Image (cartoon, coloured by chain):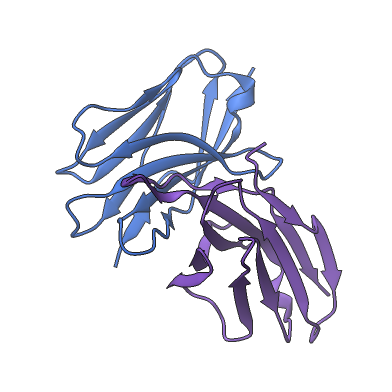
Amino acid sequence: AQTVTQSQPEMSVQEAETVTLSCTYDTSESNYYLFWYKQPPSRQMILVIRQEAYKQQNATENRFSVNFQKAAKSFSLKISDSQLGDTAMYFCAFDRLNTGNQFYFGTGTSLTVIP
Amino acid sequence: DSGVTQTPKHLITATGQRVTLRCSPRSGDLSVYWYQQSLDQGLQFLIQYYNGEERAKGNILERFSAQQFPDLHSELNLSSLELGDSALYFCASSVGLAGGVRYNEQFFGPGTRLTVL
């Protein structure tokens, strides 16, 4: 079974600083996708970034980047120059590319950006 | 705006009742997924449909059922409701396979908040 673990239930960061959110996963698959989703107080689920396991290069999207360590099964999200609008729950998700592509979600990290 | 619509936004009902949640995927997306998010919890996968066919099933209760119609919209039916069914129900859609390429980002609707009293 696939499991996704986010070991930091809550984090805070000063505005303009950098913060890293952790995610580990367990799988026997060799190819898969990993995602970070953001859920602000509005509860909308917003895709932040994706990483394909067969790509060694870490994905980046503007101020968001990941540190993907396949051997360690680790997929952390780094947010640079944190902004107040980054305050949200962040969920790590795993897609093992089976017939259906159901996502396995972690339990989330609540991030607060402090002005 | 993800392009995925869900109705209604809020639903308040009583135990034992039956409700139907509706989802319209993004234009062109063939896959629809349903997730349940209980208070302060992560998302639990319920069920997936691809072009009208059930593709994957998660921890969906027997009291719950879903279907995807020829126009690709989907409905999630919840019956014999219990207090513990109160949650935010998300629908998501993805393209799936197109031109031999896999596009599997899931785009989420705004959710339906169900309150069972």
Residue A97 placement (x, y as % from top left) = 30, 56
The quarter of the image holding the N terminus of chain A is: bottom left
Q: Residue at x 29, y 52 (%)?
A: A25
Colour purple maps to chain? B
Residue placed most toward the observer, A17 or B26: B26
Residue B15 drawn at (x, y percent): 80, 83
- Position of residue A115 measured from the top left corner of the image (x, y, whole percent): 64, 17
- Tell me: B1 left or right of B29: right
User: In front: B15, or B54?
Assistant: B54
Q: Name the foreground residue: A2 vs B96.
A: B96
When asked about the image quadrant of residue A76, the answer is top left
Instruction: Provide residue B11's location: percent of width, then percent of height.
Output: 82, 64
Q: Is residue A90 above or below residue B29?
A: above
For the point 61% across and 46% down, which residue is it? B26
What shade has chain A been given? blue
Q: Nearer the viewer, residue B14 or A103?
A: A103
